[in-house]
Amino acid sequence: MIEFHDLHTAGEPTRVIVSGFPDLGNGTISERCQRLASEHQELCAGIVREPRGHEAIVAALLLDSSDPQCDAGVIFFNNVGPLGMCGHGTIGVVRALSEMGRVQGKICSLETPAGIVRAKLHDDGDISVENVESFLYQEDVEITLDNGTVVCGDIAWGGNWFFITGAAGIPLQREGLPRLVEYSSAIRIALDLQGRTGMGGAPIDHVELHEDLPDGPLGVRCFVLCPGMEWDRSPCGTGTSATLALKAAKGKIQEGQTWIQESILGSRFSATYENGSQGILPTIRGRAYHSSRGQLIFEDDDPFRSGFPT
């Protein structure tokens, strides 16, 4: 029996697993993430997929950290497996930890597979996350879609790997969802087929489309296609970090300036950065809301213990 807290951050759901998950042993969160991926994929799928969840849910497994300076460790996973980092999920995890009485004061440190992140709880209810160092990896990368269309974009790291480009005239509105999913899925397939990767051959498993904000602040409206081909309801914390990194590298934003990233639902993250050793150190600010708490039950003879097959 899995005990969980459900929250959403700017519309994107996070299912925080607080107890009942099989023991992953000792070691760093990265090492335990590898065990989760190799030994518990069916359980992870059952936690987030229908009939117990839905394809957009990101789960956050709470663990003890291997670093005594951290308040907790966390492994994020979605409908196809673990994620290196998750910005909206971190905001949800910190809100859940605070409600559980596991945050001392206003600062919380978490060990993730991508590295250690720090979060701050603000008096107005917002939570800001100091994400891992983010950077522009390759700019002006051209790929060719299967219909012959050439797309130019940038590859950046924000805790996950992103290919970031324009929306090709598709409105970043909910009514444009079918076209947005089709277009970004075609980009994702082309990246794989044409061997475009992140550092060390890492797959680029997020595609982010941009358009300028209509009301003037420095920032963009975005659409993000996540691993598993599901779209992010929030502005995407790691995507905001990757965007800040490439904008900083191109001189489009300066250290200390505020950046606004808006989702197609109209929800927003604000962000700033400090310069780092190879890129930037972004801070993402947003708010999480509780939606439910409960238990997940997995009966032995349930044909959908592992969720609906993909």
Image: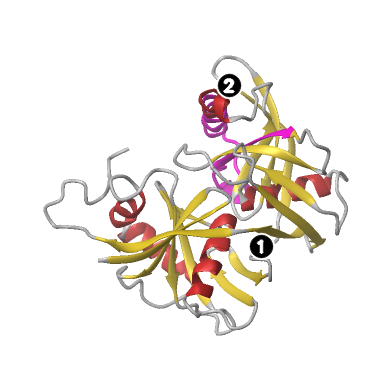
For image coordinates 26% across by 50% down, the residue present is 306
Looking at the image, residue 146 lies above or below residue 227: above
Residue 155 within the magenta-colored segment of the rendering: no
Looking at the image, residue 139 lies above or below residue 241: above
Q: Which residues are magenta?
A: 182-211
Give the mark toward the camera: 2 or 1.
1
Q: Nearer the viewer, residue 218 or 265?
A: 265
Q: Is residue 309 visible?
A: yes
Q: Is residue 279 visible?
A: no
* Name of the residue lying farthest toward the top: 147
Residue 145's disc is 2
Residue 204, position in %: x, y?
A: 57, 42
For image coordinates 61% across by 29% down, the residue present is 173
The CA span between labels 2 and 1 is 32 Å
Residue 234, position in %: x, y?
A: 58, 46
Kindly identify the amino acid type of the residue bearing the numbered disc 1.
Val
User: Circle 2 — which element?
Assistant: loop
Kindly identify the amino acid type of the residue bearing the numbered disc 2.
Leu
Residue 62, position in %: x, y?
A: 44, 70
Residue at which label 1 appears: 132
Precedes in sequence: disc 2 or disc 1:
1
